[in-house]
Amino acid sequence: MLGVFSLLISLVAPGLVTANQDAEKDGFAGSYFIDRGYATEHLNIESDGSYRSYAVSRHPVQGPVGQWKFENGFLRLRPSQSQDLKGLPDSLLVPIAWGERRYLVDRNQLAAFAVWAKTANDTAGIYTGKSREVRPDFVKRLQNYYIGVRQGDPELPSAYMDFYKNGPAVARVIRHRTDDRFELDKGSEDRLFVGLVMFVKAREANLEIVSVTEHAAVAAVRYSRNPHPILVGDTATSGDAASRPFSTGTRQYESIYDVPKLSAD
């Protein structure tokens, strides 16, 4: 998620307006925020299936409102196709419980969140604004400035616990194929798996693993902000607190790639 409004999302198609009873039951409906240092972003998830968002820097700025739905383990936020938001993809957020604390983490950034979580050092349940340990993911405000105490390990999807324990996965591009797929020099033995999204910082691009063997993998570009192609020798990482893949809700600007839409499968 980038910028003051990383979630530029608005009204949803009529068929998607469904209250998330499971999320409310598990304590995920409510008010969330991200502290980015220069501004805070806010996302309110309501029990009737609606949401609203706003940002606060020097002055509060009202953000989009819309609808949400819980499906296949994701909190799906679907944008309207209004003039300002035309072409904006859905955002897919994953609810993560960590003791009392509740996070919403973008699907593309789960591995990076896991690495950050291992190094996060705040233990108090009160957010004071003087420390930045809660960023860069949405954390729930339970009551006033109480965000809950983190206890034990975060309840991450099983495939991502390895990043929590052992840090990010890193691979190198060794071949650019004629079908615009990229071969990497690491595989399942190096913690890569199908569906993992990696970040090529030098090209400002996301790669998603589409096939994997023990010692090699094939990846496809899923997002690029850089008009220059990924090159042999470039490094891809699953991410950490400082270097993360672009979020699922990032607008795709003009690119040399025909980027397919990510699915929740």
Image (tube, rainbow, N blue to C red):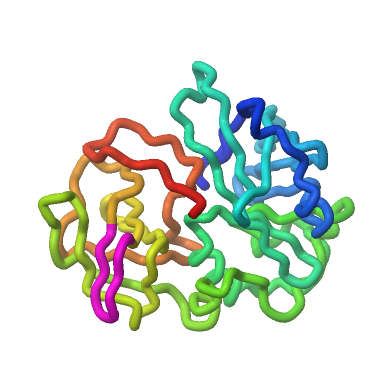
The residue shown at (38%, 36%) is 252
Residue 239, x across and y down, in percent: 43, 65
Residue 70, x across and y down, in percent: 67, 48
- Residue at far top of view: 83
Q: Which residues are magenta?
A: 210-219
The relative height of residue 222 versus residue 49 in the rendered view (above or below) is below
The relative height of residue 204 versus residue 161 in the rendered view (above or below) is above
Q: Is residue 78 left or right of residue 214?
A: right
Q: Nearer the viewer, residue 135 or 57?
A: 135
Tell me if residue 217 is in the magenta stretch.
Answer: yes
The relative height of residue 59 versus residue 170 in the rendered view (above or below) is above
Q: Is residue 104 left or right of residue 163?
A: right
Tell me if residue 150 is in the magenta stretch.
Answer: no
Residue 140, x across and y down, in percent: 76, 54
The residue shown at (48%, 36%) is 89
In this rendering, does residue 11 appear at all?
Answer: no
Residue 33, x across and y down, in percent: 70, 48
The relative height of residue 230 versus residue 191 in the rendered view (above or below) is above
Q: Quadrant of residue 60?
A: top right
- Residue at far left of view: 178
Q: Quadrant of residue 120?
A: bottom right
Q: Nearer the viewer, residue 258 or 142?
A: 258
